[in-house]
């Protein structure tokens, strides 16, 4: 196996891992956005009831 083949395999593995990490990041970001949205709705509701 040549050095170039070895590097190509490592890069393919690295790219695959990066894609997996990106998916995890996107999923967590979506969950955080949903939580923030729910909190904003609660705050808005509390403001209406307080008025």
Image (spheres, helix red, strand yellow):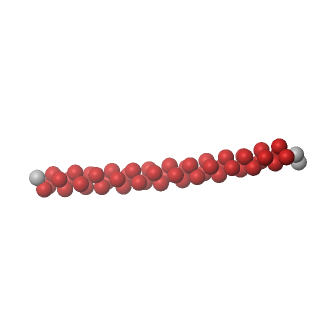
Q: Position of residue 2 (x, y in %)?
A: 88, 46
Q: Is residue 10 left or right of residue 16?
A: right
Q: Position of residue 45 (x, y in %)?
A: 20, 53
Q: Residue at x 41, y 54 (%)?
A: 32
Q: Position of residue 30 (x, y in %)?
A: 44, 50
Q: Residue at x 17, y 53 (%)?
A: 47
Looking at this view, name the residue that lies furthest to the right: 1
Q: Is residue 5 left or right of residue 14?
A: right
Number of numbered labels in the structure image: 0
Looking at this view, name the residue that lies furthest to the front: 3
Q: Nearer the viewer, residue 3 or 39?
A: 3
Q: Residue at x 19, y 56 (%)?
A: 46
Q: Is residue 41 left or right of residue 12?
A: left
Q: Residue at x 52, y 52 (%)?
A: 25
Q: Is residue 17 left or right of residue 3?
A: left
Q: Position of residue 4 (x, y in %)?
A: 83, 43
Q: Nearer the viewer, residue 4 or 38?
A: 4
């Amino acid at each position: 196996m040549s050095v170039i083949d070895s590097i190509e395999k490592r890069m393919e593995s690295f790219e695959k891992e990066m894609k997996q990490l990106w998916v995890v990041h996107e999923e967590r970001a979506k969950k955080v956005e949903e939580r923030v949205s729910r909190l904003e709705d609660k705050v808005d509701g509390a403001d209406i009831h307080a008025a």
